[in-house]
Image: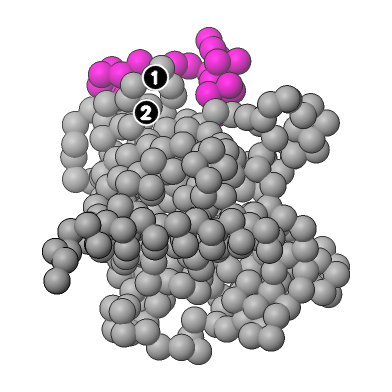
Amino acid sequence: MDDSTYGKRNKRGDWSPFGRLEIAPVFVLPPKPLAFLKWLPGYFLPWNLIWAASAVAYWYLVVPAPEAMQSLALGWVLKLFLVNCVLVFLFYGAFELRLYILKAQANRFKYNGKFPSEHKNEAFLFSNQNLDGMIRGFGTGVPIWTAYEVLILWAYANGYVQWTGFAEHPLYLFALFLVLPIWHEAHFFCIHRLIHWAPLYKWIHSVHHNSVNPSPWSSLSMHPVEHLLYFSSSLIHLVVPSNPILAIYQLHYSGFGAVVGHIGFDKIEVTEDAAFDSHAYAHYLHHKFFEVNYGDGLVPLDQWFGTWHDGSPEGEERMNARYQKKVERMNRKAAKTTPAE
Ligand SMILES: [Zn+2]
Ligand SMILES: [Zn+2]
């Protein structure tokens, strides 16, 4: 496909889409019903539908019978962990293989003109972005993800939380299914904003930001404390009446969905003239500029807090003006604390 009809490339070879990133027309006043209807298919396609399908398949093919999960036996816990490892390897690996190893679409639609393998970075474990991501992902990411999963399934199996059935409450559970991505986004925004607070950033979140040019294995390249916070969105299923399949959906949304913001390409080509949108640009801009787009624009929290970057020159100006103000604030603070000579 010709990416120049969808965006432009600068001198460095970085590609950016025409137009600007739009906040989802969900929490907007006045309501925009037409824009909402136009936006709606993209809410399901392709990602949310994939996580929904994977959650259902996982429930029927992988999760043992509730009676078996009433006790925390090593067998089923280990099985879930190993299956999660294999699925992450295959899913993340598929994007890595196609886009970064085989380079099936070269750098068409690629935000950063360079591939991570072209530049070494000492900040990574073994100075290698992929190895770093895999070690952190499989070392603490998938174990913590599985720990939440086991805790939730065990609680359902023992009747410690309310197990709402699809047969009895289909509408309620469908509504919950629709709301969960919004919950994920609000939760993610809050924990993400928290770990951008300087002391926590240095200790925890700087690990994730080593990937300035993110690629699929950057997705779970996080400090273990960030993994703990990130996957904790699933705990909502211990609080509100829900169903274990929706809890798994939530975990797949977080675990597999993490790859979405780190694909590094705006469109994934499927055939020579067909492609689907990755929805990765907002989070790519976060990795590029750090203090913008703490969320992905589903809930307009960034807009409300003035940290939204829509990819336009005006967005860039707003960001620079904000940085300038921050520098002035810090200088004033420093001048106050430094005794006059
Ligand atoms: Zn990221
Ligand atoms: Zn961040």
The residue at 32%/46% (across/down) is: 194
Q: Nearer the viewer, residue 252 or 86?
A: 252
Secondary structure, mark 2, is: helix
Residue 157 falls within the magenta-colored stretch: yes
Q: Residue at x 59, y 29 (%)?
A: 178
Q: In the picture shown, does residue 327 fall above or below 234? A: below
Q: Position of residue 112 (x, y in %)?
A: 59, 76
Quarter of the image with the C terminus in it: bottom left
- The numbered mark at residue 240 is 1
Amino acid at circle 1: Val
The residue at the point 26 percent across, 44 percent down is 147
> Eyeballing the image, is 159 above or below 27?
above
Find out if the beta carbon at label 1 lies less than 8 Å from the nearest ligand 1 atom.
no
- Report the label total: 2
Q: Could you tell me residue 326's position as x and y percent?
A: 40, 57
Residue 134 placement, left or right of 216: left
**Image: magenta residue range:** 156-177
> Which residue lies at the image location 49% right of the left edge and 41% below the top edge?
305
Q: Amino acid at mark 2?
A: Ile
Residue found at the far front of this picture: 341
| Image-based side of 253 in relation to 338, left or right | right
The numbered dot on residue 109 is none
Q: Is residue 299 left or right of residue 82?
A: right
Per the image, the residue denoted by label 2 is 236
